[in-house]
Each structure stands twice: as C-alpha cells, then as structure tokens.
Image (cartoon, grey):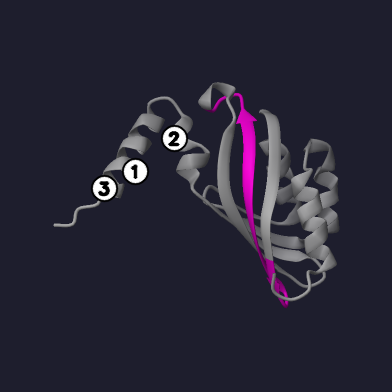
Amino acid sequence: MGAKESPLIGHFVQLFTTMNRQKIPRLAGIYADDICFIDPLHQVEGLTHFSAYMASLFDNLSHYEVKVEDVVQQSDCAFITWQMRYQHSAIKRGKMIEVDGASKLLFHDKIYWHQDYFDAGSMMYEHLPVLGTAVRWVKKRVSRYDAG
C-alpha cells in the first residue's frame, strides 16, 4: 500500500464489498454531487444519475459480491484491484460469472472521479447467445501468437 489509507477509501471498500440495492442511499456519503463515473460500458455524471445507474444494476442480479485484493493510495488518488462475482438472469443463463477489475478514484472530501477497468467481454459479451460465440472466436484469433 502507498500512503496511509484515507478513511474515505476505507468507507468505499466497505460499501462496495457489501453493496446491495438497499445501500444505494449511502453513496451520497462517499461521492460528490458532481461525481463522474466511467467504465467500459457507461459514463454517468452526477450523483443522482450514478445512484439510479447503481440501482438499475441490481434489478436482475440474484447474486453480487466484490472481493478487494489491493488498495494503493497516494495523496488524493486511490487504485483498487478487485474480483466481482455475480449472477444476472439474462447473462450466461443466470450462472455465476467472475470478473477481475480495478478502480481509479480521485477525491478530496468525497470521491469526484471513479473509473472502473475490466474486460467487458469477460463480464458480459462472452456470455450472451450468438454474440458470445463471436466474441470468444475473435479473442481466440487475436491472441494467437505467430513467431513468423
């Protein structure tokens, strides 16, 4: 870990490792009103929109858990690596999916920038009928090593 972890980052980790629909109002305790959230699938600006986005994520989840692996913080920036496990009724026939990712947080009194990094194919696209087959095929073709 870098510098001493901010209490704010500790609250972030605690909230996201236990997140559920009922805890959405707690986002206001750690995020600024003008939060900018970005991930490979979305960009959301403002706490009201971010809270609505987070609530919508839980609409079809039957299971959600996040395990934080590392927290590195320097001054007003934190980088957190994590593994998410979830089940969604429309993805992979509701079976468990595991995705590794990382979050970059910028903050002062509250978090004003949250950017998630993860493989969107592993999270969702690979598990959808028809599209999943195509995504897996492309990934396999691109990953072939040709020493020439």
Task: Estimate the x, y position of residue 79 in percent, counting from the top left.
Answer: 64, 65
Crowding near pointer 2: few (<14 within 10 Å), some, many (20+)?
Answer: many
Instruction: Give left or right: position of 131 versus 23.
Output: left
Kind of residue indicated by mark 2: Glu
Task: Estimate the x, y position of residue 131 in percent, counting from the top left.
Answer: 39, 31
Picture quarter with the C terminus = bottom left
Distance Cα–Cα, label 3 vs label 1:
9 Å
Magenta-drawn segment: 72-91
Q: Is residue 23 magenta?
A: no
Crowding near pointer 1: few (<14 within 10 Å), some, many (20+)?
Answer: few
Distance Cα–Cα, label 1 vs label 2:
10 Å
Label 1: which residue?
139
Which residue: 36% across, 30% down? Answer: 133
In the rendered structure, are the residues bearing label 1 and label 2 in contact, judged by CB atoms less than 8 Å apart?
yes
Distance Cα–Cα, label 2 vs label 3:
18 Å
State the count of labels.
3
Which residue: 49% across, 48% down? Answer: 119
**Which quadrant would residue 30 be assigned to in this image?**
bottom right
